[in-house]
Amino acid sequence: MSLEFVSLEKIQEFAHHYGYWAIFIGILLENLGIPIPGETVTLIGGFLAGSKELNYWFVLGSAIFGAVLGGIFGYWIGRTTGWEFILRVAGFFRIPAVRLEELKDKFSQNAAQAVFFGRFIALLRIFSGLLAGIAGMSFAQFFVYNLAGAAVWASVMVTLAFFVGQIVSLEQLVSWVGEFAIFALVIAIAWIVVPIWWESRQVKKIASED
């Protein structure tokens, strides 16, 4: 999901000037939670590789390395200070700590899948490393799924832009990928929130019957 305040033309210009470094840094910063449209940067890298301006394998390697390293940094931030920060913010907004614990447990049960498949989901790609650290996922397990997820995601994005970018416009391709990422986010939120809501509803129903 790209951010509207950064135009596609500006990102293309940046990629033209800095090549593989633009791809690496864009993905790295996005995975640190900085609002850089890393997904768009990767698609542009694949597009430039398809037009022979950049090398496909170097683009792919830059994207994977940036995603893996950014995810690792995010993981350690979450592991060391993330949970305390979330509790402070939740307290300010009067969000019950027990509700946060429920969400944390839910993520912990599915942390491996979230880290791997989260690469294809808007926002979760940015925060999956941070959330994995907060949830207490072991670093060894995180590293494996982070690397696998980054490799698969980068391969799909770069290859998609490499081939499809020769058929449709880059603007259309970026739009399609962004829409898919947002749709995946909606599904992921529903998958987490609906069971919690249903369980809470059943508990209230049982309590009212008693």
Image (cartoon, helix red, strand yellow):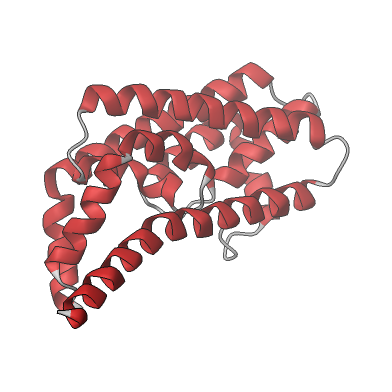
> Could you tell me if residue 16 is visible in this image?
no
> Could you tell me if residue 76 is visible in this image?
yes
Of all residues shown, which one is farthest toward the top?
57
Residue at the spot 27% in from the left edge and 50% down from the top edge? 106
Q: In this view, does 207 lie to the left or right of 18?
A: left
Residue at the spot 60% in from the left edge and 42% down from the top edge? 41
Identify whether 101 is placed above or below 80.
below
Foreground of the two, 187 or 164: 187
Q: In which quarter of the image is the N terminus?
A: bottom right
Q: Is residue 119 left or right of residue 104?
A: right
Residue at the spot 65% in from the left edge and 56% down from the top edge? 179
Identify whether 190 is placed above or below 95.
above
Q: Is residue 199 left or right of residue 194?
A: left
The location of residue 23, given as percent across then percent down, is 55, 35
The location of residue 206, given as percent across then percent down, is 21, 73
Foreground of the two, 208 or 187: 208
Which quadrant of the view contains residue 195? bottom left
Q: In which quarter of the image is the C terminus?
A: bottom left
The location of residue 199, given as percent across then percent down, is 29, 64
Residue at the spot 22% in from the left edge and 52% down from the top edge? 104
Foreground of the two, 59 or 96: 96
Foreground of the two, 52 or 63: 63
Which quadrant of the view contains residue 190? bottom left
Which quadrant of the view contains residue 53? top right
The location of residue 132, given as percent across then percent down, is 27, 41
Q: How many labels does the image show?
A: 0
Identify whether 112 is placed above or below 182.
above
Of all residues shown, which one is farthest toward the bottom?
208
Q: In this view, does 204 lie to the left or right of 183?
A: left
